[in-house]
Image (cartoon, helix red, strand yellow):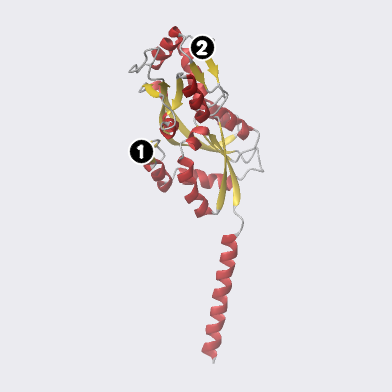
């Protein structure tokens, strides 16, 4: 009799614990706001990188895909919890001014110059991107810029500055993300600076070709950082650090390394040697 009482007591306790764990697990997930670049979303990387994290931590990542400049502005206003961006100088300033903490290198790819197969500026095969831009300006060949203060836009403006060129009437600022800018460049049969990941995701939708690549100036690193909870106490710092830990962990870096489109790797992870 005593043994039966103990058995049923333990069984009842086990069921209670199971029900409690089920309730806890089934609780509405905490929402985490990630401000990031259009390139990470357009490339499709977030579609494979975030779901395992969300399931593991019972979190929901609300992705705000904008240019890096806009993403950093969201962080400065306390309207995001964590940033994944690709403008080292702007990120340095963000950290130095106390808006962000715990910045970590995540991955890199590169920028490429795309254009129509007719290549009116004759830049195909030119590795020196400044020389390629100079040819485009000399021929007054149509060029479409993102014009949105994104990391890509900042890089492009820097190349024009190095070349000593102020773009003129042959130059259009789209004010759009990378995907939309590529489609405009396709319609205009224009040149455009693009990150390789977005191009690989869109190459079946456009006819533009890679005409200039390989210059060290086109290196494109990505970093992740939390918005500073000391300055913005409403932000979800613990959850932001969980995402940073995931993205820079062995499993997270493995997902980044293995993510491909048609056999081509889009990003090279750097957090784990």
Q: Classify 10 Å Cα crowding around label 1: few (below 14), some (14-19), many (20 and above).
A: few
Residue farthest along the top direction in this orientation: 138
Q: Nearer the viewer, residue 155 or 211?
A: 211
Q: Position of residue 253 (x, y in %)?
A: 41, 43
Q: Nearer the viewer, residue 118 or 154?
A: 118
Q: Position of residue 67 (x, y in %)?
A: 55, 29
Image marks 2 and 1: residues in contact by CB distance under 8 Å: no
Q: CA distance from mark 2 to mark 1?
A: 34 Å
Task: Look at 38% across and 24% down and name the residue there.
Answer: 209
Task: Look at 46% across and 33% down and name the residue there.
Answer: 222
Circle 2 is placed at which residue position? 170
Mark 1 lies on a secondary structure that is loop
Q: Position of residue 190 (x, y in %)?
A: 46, 18
Task: Look at 60% across and 41% down and name the residue there.
Answer: 81
Q: Quadrant of residue 214?
A: top left
Measured along the vertical axis of the image, is residue 89 above or below residue 138?
below
- Looking at the rendered image, the quarter that the C terminus falls into is top left
Circle 1 is placed at which residue position? 262
Q: Nearer the viewer, residue 265 or 100?
A: 265
User: Is there any visible trace of residue 55 in the rendered image?
Assistant: yes
Q: Quadrant of residue 221?
A: top left
User: Is there any visible trace of residue 272 in the rendered image?
Assistant: no
- Looking at the rendered image, the quarter that the N terminus falls into is bottom right
Q: Classify 10 Å Cα crowding around label 2: few (below 14), some (14-19), many (20 and above).
A: some
Task: Look at 57% across and 28% down and name the residue there.
Answer: 69
Measured along the vertical axis of the image, is residue 218 above or below residue 244?
above
Mark 2 lies on a secondary structure that is loop
Q: Earlier in the sequence, mark 2 or mark 1?
A: 2
Measured along the vertical axis of the image, is residue 272 above or below residue 117?
below
């Amino acid at each position: 009799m005593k043994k039966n009482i103990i058995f049923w007591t333990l069984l009842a306790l086990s069921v209670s614990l199971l029900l409690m764990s089920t309730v806890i697990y089934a609780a509405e997930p905490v929402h985490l706001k990630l401000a990031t670049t259009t390139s990470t979303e357009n490339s499709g990387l977030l579609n494979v990188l975030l779901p395992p994290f969300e399931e593991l931590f019972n979190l929901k990542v609300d992705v705000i895909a904008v240019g890096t400049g806009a993403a950093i502005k969201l962080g400065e206003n306390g309207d995001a919890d964590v940033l994944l961006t690709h403008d080292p100088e702007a990120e340095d300033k963000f950290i130095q001014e106390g808006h962000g903490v715990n910045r970590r290198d995540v991955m890199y790819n590169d920028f490429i110059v795309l254009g129509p197969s007719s290549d009116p500026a004759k830049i195909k095969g030119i590795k020196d991107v400044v020389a390629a831009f100079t040819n485009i300006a000399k021929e007054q060949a149509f060029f479409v810029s993102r014009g949105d203060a994104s990391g890509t836009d900042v890089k492009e403006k820097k190349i024009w500055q190095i070349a000593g060129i102020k773009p003129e009437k042959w130059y259009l600022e789209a004010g759009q993300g990378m995907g939309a800018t590529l489609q405009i460049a396709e319609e205009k049969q224009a040149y455009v600076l693009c990150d390789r990941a977005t191009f690989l995701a869109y190459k079946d939708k456009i006819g533009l070709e890679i005409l200039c690549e390989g210059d060290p100036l086109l290196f494109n690193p990505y970093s992740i950082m939390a918005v500073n909870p000391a300055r913005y106490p409403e932000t979800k710092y613990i959850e932001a650090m969980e995402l940073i830990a995931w993205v820079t962990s062995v499993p997270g870096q493995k997902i980044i390394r293995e993510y491909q489109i048609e056999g081509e790797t889009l990003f090279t992870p750097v957090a784990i040697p």
